[in-house]
Image (cartoon, coloured by chain):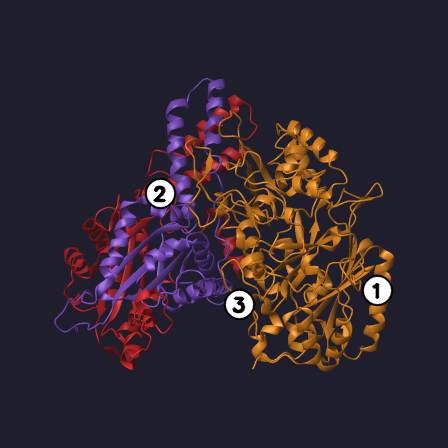
Amino acid sequence: MGNISGNAYALTVLAPIREGHVDERAYSSLVRDHLENWNLLPNSPMAQVPQTYLCRYFVLDDVYIESLPGASALDTYSDFLPVVPNGVRLGVLPAHDHLKSKYLVFSCNFHGDLDTYLHAMWTAISTEIKDVWGYCYGFDQVTNAEEFAAYVKKCQLPAALFFVGSNDDPLEEQLKALYLKQEFSKFAVESQGLPTALLKKKYQEFIARVAPTNLSGPSWTPGQYSLPKAQDKQQEAAL
Amino acid sequence: MSNIAGKAYAMNVITPIRWYTTWLNKLIFWVALKKPSTLSGLITLSLIHYARWVIIGKNQFPHVHVDQPKEELRYSYMLFFSNFNGSWDQYVDSFTFAIPSGLDMFWKWNIRYPHSVALTPFHKYIQYNQLETAHYYSAYPLAASNDIKAAKKLKSMLIAFDQQWHDAPDEQFQKQYNTLLRGLQHDMGEMRPTPIVSMSAAQVEKRHARDLRKAKQEKVEAMEGPQHG
Amino acid sequence: MTTVLDLMDIQGDVVRPYGRFGFPVARYVFFNIRDGAAARAFVAEIAAQVTTAATWDQGPNPIPRPQATTNIAFTYQGLKQLELPRESLIGFPAEFAMGMKQRKDILGDDGPSSPEYWDPIWRANREKDRNKDVHFFISINGQSQEFIEQRYQSLLALVAKYSHAITLLTGHRGNDGAEDLPYQDVHAIVENGQITAKEHFGYTDGIGDPYFEGLADPKERILGRGKQMADGTWAPLATGEFVLGHIDEAQEYPPAPKPNLLSRNGTYMVYRKLHENVASFDQFLERESQNYPGGKELLAAKFVGRWRDNGAPLVSAPDAESKKAWDARFNANAGNEAAQDHMLSNFTYDDDMSGAKCPFSAHIRRINPRASLEFKQGDNPGAMVANPGAFDTPGALANRRRILRRGLPYGDAKDRSTDRGNHGIVIMMLNADISRQFEFVQQQWINYGNDFKAANDKEILLGNHNKEYPSKAVIQVDPDSDQVPYFVRNIPRLVETRGGDYFFIPSLTALRMIAKGLIDPT
């Protein structure tokens, strides 16, 4: 099935947003507002949702009308006619399509099974979910994880092609691997040229510290965007 | 700022397709899935974390409530979501230079698709049909797709090495350790916060950092009372 | 199919690296414009002296090789002062309008490379005092210093006529602590009375300029300088990569300001003054080569991808032994410039996909990876192998990132015990698209390493190494050997930016029209 590639899942959700307003601000505008406020938090609420690789939200206002020139055969088939009747000429211009509702679009890449993921998502951030999804049609009926999963599946669309460029490992594996890459590279550089006995000793200390097979040992945290020692310096330098 | 999460960039493109060619589009994608060699260029470029194409038939926009008006569309739509490394320009440029035929294959039959060569019409087509992301999250903003792949390889080789040679006699340990490093010689780059992707993104981030700092300071002052002069 | 370039319409510095054509010295002068209309009259007079790209001493009615050349280029602010219409001005790309100083975050000009440390002329440029802005640039290249002085004096005489309209800007640093020179002098380094192509770290520079369609250069120079094709041949790069108004590698005319006559046959120039920390380099090389199995000169070669003494590419001469053989062949070709150039430029990375000969973080591999980015993991974990057919052409990722390099070293490094002397290079990089070519290479390939599977590891020589995140580079080894990769550690910042800006080099046609105030995009 197009949504699945190995153990990675591509979830595409278009949830229709209700027509309505609060104090002259449309619901869709409020949804956007909530999402943009998420950008001002220390980290995304999605960092608390287990197994999330990368995900995004946006509000789809409307579809676009293609006014750029066409280049494919179907756009230009009328060229074969020596004389183009006016009706045909107008007919090949792109039609004006419009959506009747705005949609909250949620596109998510995660590891594992859909139901498990959605249940865990509700458990972790149900308040934030209600903030953002609360204006969607029928969402007022969603009060628990089960109902949330059912709702999302009603709004879900299948992917025609899901391309996994990196891998489909559990998130903890990916984060641990990144941590090990960073730490081992540092170790290899620092211990260059050491006499063998000392190298071996330092190596064993290193392994004890980083615990490669222990996923709950030291690792990177989901959504981590700075390196430990330089965090404050970065903020100062950025100003 | 909202299209970027560290080293990852979010692109969303929506393009109309004729309802009677959607089966062709789906077929092309199906073939790509079955024949991995079609994606060889994409894989070699190595810039993508995850990407997907979604085809929404004109009657397939989710309809979940009796109050929701039913969509009446002439066209079906193709949605493209990509999570890639680098800036928009770098990404689109890389694809156009390296795999123009692949791009053409996927966007074939889209209304008024200009083909990927020459460059500027293709740039215009993508920009024209792009949707901005409101909120974007990456679990590892410090890592590019290459880093994730290298990390997986490093972890597995390190564990295998450790299992076999952790307590090996010195000479053997050294030899195997050298072999380990040699096998990882392309995987030991260190990760740092990304180079900035665009001037505007950097400006937004600077303002944000400054606002955070100000907010923090105001909080502290509120708790401690105003600083003595 | 072949473009024929109108060489008399293109300025000479675009097609010719004068430094290697018998003009081993140059002087760069910068001006501010106070009165646009009067300045245009100056431009009209100087236009008559501008050296074109016409071939010298050839054909009927030959143009003699001049003793000195004159060329001119303008910043965005300069074009504005000359009163180009707004409709033309907005057609210039954003980065050109912003100027190099404002792009420092993209270029990595931080720490010791920040504008606060630049030469006074560049510090003052585009700040509060508009009278200190750099508006245009005149370069004088000479067969000798004497000819430079002559040309400079006649330039000064002309400038004096227009003293109400233009000012010659001072503020270049020079020898003996000078801070306020009226020009930037550059010159080839002379060793034992011989003019060399060296720079102050000891490397032979100025090898391998891109070969593009329409150049009057001999056809053999395409090998190694053009673009690599899948069948092993070389093809010329499209002219539009380097000269506006001609088709580029994307099969279109590069976006350019209107009207066409303003941009056609013109190009952009990135002028950068780069100070070289000679003491840091020497100490760094000394320190890191202590334990390097191949020795100091091999390690120095690994930094750049070429041996210091004669520029032998590591790909062709990966160790001391093969270097000896290479040297023998090279010296046997003494006097045969074409053959020597062949040995220096004609190579690929096809037999070095793992970087065992030329490391992935070496200078020349980072600034021009040729076809080496069409690669994938090999069977051996430490090996990268070619992945033929993955891309449209093998060099797809490099073909549109090529740059014409001009310029010469400045100062001298007789005292190598300190970094603080006056020594470095002035490099001018010419391309049709500053952000796609120069800025991309600077930001993505020099100061970052993702495309080379090196995460954030920077290019050894030019990278903006800093103390906060100490830099390292991996010197790869043959994956089928039993050698261990070598780490070059704690790389100091070896090169510091000391100033520069983005310029537009107009064609002769555009120059004359600008001078007459006739640019009109209607």
Above or below, comparing residue B120 to residue B47 in the picture: below
Element marked by disc 1: helix
Q: Which mark is residue A174?
A: 2
Rendered-image quadrant of the C terminus of chain C: bottom right
Image quadrant in which you'd find residue C361: top right
**Residue hosting label 1:** C151
- Asked if labels 1 and 3 share a chain, the reply is yes
Q: Picture coordinates of residue A88 (x, y %)?
A: 28, 77
Element marked by disc 2: helix
**Residue hosting label 3:** C255
* Chain painted in purple in the figure: B
Quick check: C446 left or right of A222? right
Above or below, comparing residue C303 to residue C178 in the picture: above
Identify the residue at image location x=81%, y=54%: C175
Q: CA distance from mark 1 to mark 2?
A: 64 Å
Identify the residue at image location x=41%, y=22%: B165
Element marked by disc 3: loop
Identify the residue at image location x=37%, y=50%: B49
What's the residue type where badge 2 is placed?
Answer: Gln
Q: Picture coordinates of residue C28 (x, y %)?
A: 76, 62
